[in-house]
Amino acid sequence: MEQSAVLTMRGICKFFPGVRALENVDFTLREGEIHALMGENGAGKSTLIKVLTGVYPKDGGEIHLKGHDAAVNIRSPQDAQNLGISTVYQEITLCPNLTVAENMYIGRTKDPTVNWKKINADASKLLESLAIPAKATQQLGSCSIAVQQMVAIARAVDMDCKVLILDEPTSSLDEQEVAKLFKLMISLKEKGVGIIFVTHFLEQVYEVCDRITVLRDGKLVGEYVIEDLPRVQLVSKMLGKEFDDVADIKSEADTENIDYNGTPVYEAEQLAGTTGIKPFDFQIHKGEVNGFTGLLGSGRSECVRAIFGADKVNGGTVKVNGKTVKINKPLDAMKNGISYLPEDRKRDGIVGDLSVRDNIILALQVMKGFFRPFSRAQAEAFADEYIKLLSIKTASSDTPIKSLSGGNQQKVILARWLLANPVYLILDEPTRGIDIGTKVEIQKLVLKLASEGKSVTFISSEIDEMIRTCSRLVVMRDGKVVGELSGDDFNQNKIMATIAGGESK
Amino acid sequence: MSTNSNVSKKGLKDRVALTDTSLLLIITIVVFVVMYVCAVVFLGKGFTKPQTFLNILNENASLIILSCGMSLVMITGGIDISVGQVTALVCMACAVHLDFNGGNVVSSMFLAVGIGLAFGVVQGFLVAYLDIQPFIVTLAGLFFAKGMTTIINSSQFNVQNEQFQAMKTTTVTVPLLGAVNKQGVYVPAYVEIGVIVALVVVILLFVALRWTKLGRNFYAVGGNNQSANMLGINVKLTKFMAHVLCGLCAGIGGYVYFMHVGSGSPSHAAGAEMNAIASSIIGGTMLTGGVGNIIGTFFGVLSLSTIKNIVASLGLDEAWWTNITVAAMLCIFLLVQSVILARKANKK
């Protein structure tokens, strides 16, 4: 029998100046199901969620909720909350300066006073029942991001919601935490809650979801029961073109040209950072693509930050092309031909208000010196070249970078570092939070660069992505390098085993 | 850093790191106590007498109230630099009202509160609903209040109204704190009415910030206003209310100032907003919003004026000495705060 619909959205439209973010989108959520909302960046997932939660007013269409005869009008997040629609966003939308308990209960009562005893007791009980490792009276800012995320979910759970929206909740969680979250989602589903799950991770969709709705370019592609939609099909629906298998690039990691006996392009001995990583040895040869892998927090980003001099380094020797050099700050690294694409695009990468062009020439300009600016024509030539080369989708090179989609922003940052013409390029999570099409493009680009003789370090939290791209993998655990895999050892099982370590037999 | 090493095992297990707000409050109180004790020990003289301490309150009752309002706005992440000139306007308006317009004390009080509220409402509306930078809005408010003060009356004059004089000279005796003077006569310790008003304001606002929904919303909005919006808090209303309450405080504080000086003048309370900001910061309110405590602000005012008194009693009477000492104190405070918060962040 068909489960009854708890939420029905019909013909939803939303326009932004110059963009049709949503056009006639239908969406149906049934009681007690986990419904994946999929689409590339810019497909309209976030917009749909924001319309549903009252962050954006809709420009057309109707929203019906179970138990309401007429179409409901959601004008603010409060309205959504009152109607039983709760959201957990990708970025933590809690207040770091308040306590855990307060974050769970603030903004929810009509009561003009705060009963601390009650909210602390209630919060403790709830945290315990959900096995969240936080104390009710702890300041939220002192918890890890993962715990903060779980507190946000706990808040939503406690609001007795009929519709729970999880907008990329897993992007900052490690596998164990994801498993815990899924357990929680399934138990909520059994209680009849309808869950909308937005994520980039295909595996996760197939692990927990019952149904999938796919959006593309602000339009509805279709709604599918999960069993009827194999992965390849899903990806092809999202991309909107016949799926040229991502696995194709597997063989492209060409190891034959790499001269392992020659002088390494970059070599570090007992390099030690101040950010909690143990001293490590590392080298990379010309034309090689290698990767750092490990669980969240294992220190893979810290390693490359130490290589680039982004974090303070204490101790160790570094050789570039066989010559000993000192790298204490990013500029030192850049002058030695090392480029680094940081993990956190928003914080360390883009300069949001500057134009695409200015963002592209930034690194080169820094190396040249600020008192010798590029002429407008030169800058334009550089920008246009790379916009074309990486097929960056932007109105013009004058557009502020912040108005681009995540994937295109990433390409701009990539262009910035390519323009600096490095011999050794470090890419820390270049494929995070961007759409599948761009992911594939970036992976292909990495392989192309390597075949042109550049050395690349490629870091991704998706192991299969790394297997496809890298020829050697440095495995980390708890801030220590615990293994280096290449050749025959280079397969998923072996990598997992190395990451997990000896204790898990 | 752990001072309570002899806590029982259970106590240790349940111990939770202090929130930033509580941590900064403790720092403020400790610094004030240490400073005052040092003054008593090394300077002796006046500082040993309870009345010296009470005089600090008498002198600063108005500043305490202004600072409390300032802290509210700062906790929401804003600022209000108009409060000093609003104080001057309140003094002038009430003075003219009492002496030239035949007003009585009660109506002058309403006038003061009304002026403060009017500023709060207009500024709050501009900041919250039209989304204009609070600094700019209240800067406009500052100039407007300054202009209005001079329009009402351009020179200083003392209020003659008898009813007001009676109220102004009324003091409240504080039991047990009196001292025997050189002639052997017992002089009771006293505070002005304004101090009582200030203490009431401090307590009311402290309770409001800690135990009311509106109070907690101030912190949430200051912590992250987008998050606060997502959490279902009416951010605009919250910011508006912070400015309204700050305006109300400026009105009340202005009247307390008026009772203390008993005159109207365009130059009254010049720079009071800066003292209020400094006191709030010393009291552990952060300019970035979301962190602060009214009790801290209270101690912030006391610290600020104690340091001024210390400088004065060292014979360094010139204004620049005081200013430089206050500047140094602010720097040290901000430094201590950021060091401690950074250490705490590293520990997690």
Image (cartoon, helix red, strand yellow):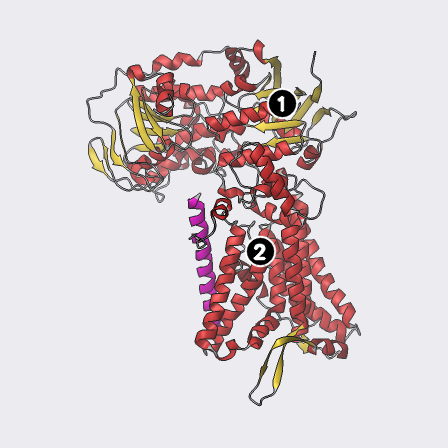
Tag 2: amino acid: Asn
Q: What secondary structure is the magenta-colored segment mainly? A: helix
Quadrant containing the C terminus of chain B is top left
- Tell me, yes or no, whether dots 2 and 1 are on the same chain: no
Say which residue label 2 marks: B293
Q: Chain of mark 1?
A: A
Residue A498 position within the rendered picture, expressed as x and y whole percent measured from the top left: 34, 23
User: Which residues are drawn in magenta?
Assistant: B318-347
Asked if A390 appears above or below A373 in the picture, the reply is above
> What chain does mark 2 sit on?
B
Tell me: A444 left or right of A159: left
For this view, does A200 lie left or right of residue A108? left
Q: Amino acid at mark 1?
A: Lys
Residue visible at 47% across and 73% down?
Answer: B39
Is B333 magenta? The answer is yes
User: Residue at left 29%, top 39%?
Assistant: A332
- Report x, y in % for residue A283: 26, 28
> Could you say where residue B162 lies in the image, as x and y percent from the top left?
76, 79
Q: Residue at x 61, y 65 (%)?
A: B64
Q: Which mark is residue A189?
A: 1
Residue B236's place in the image compared with A8, above or below, is below
Q: Position of residue A39 (x, y in %)?
A: 55, 20
Local SS, label 1? helix
Horizontal placement of A301 versus A78: left or right?
left
Locate residue A116 relative to residue B319 in the image: left or right: right
SS at mark 2 in the image: loop
Q: Is residue B237 above or below residue A296?
A: below
Between residue B298 and residue B1, name the one nearer to us.
B1
Magenta stretch contains residue B337: yes
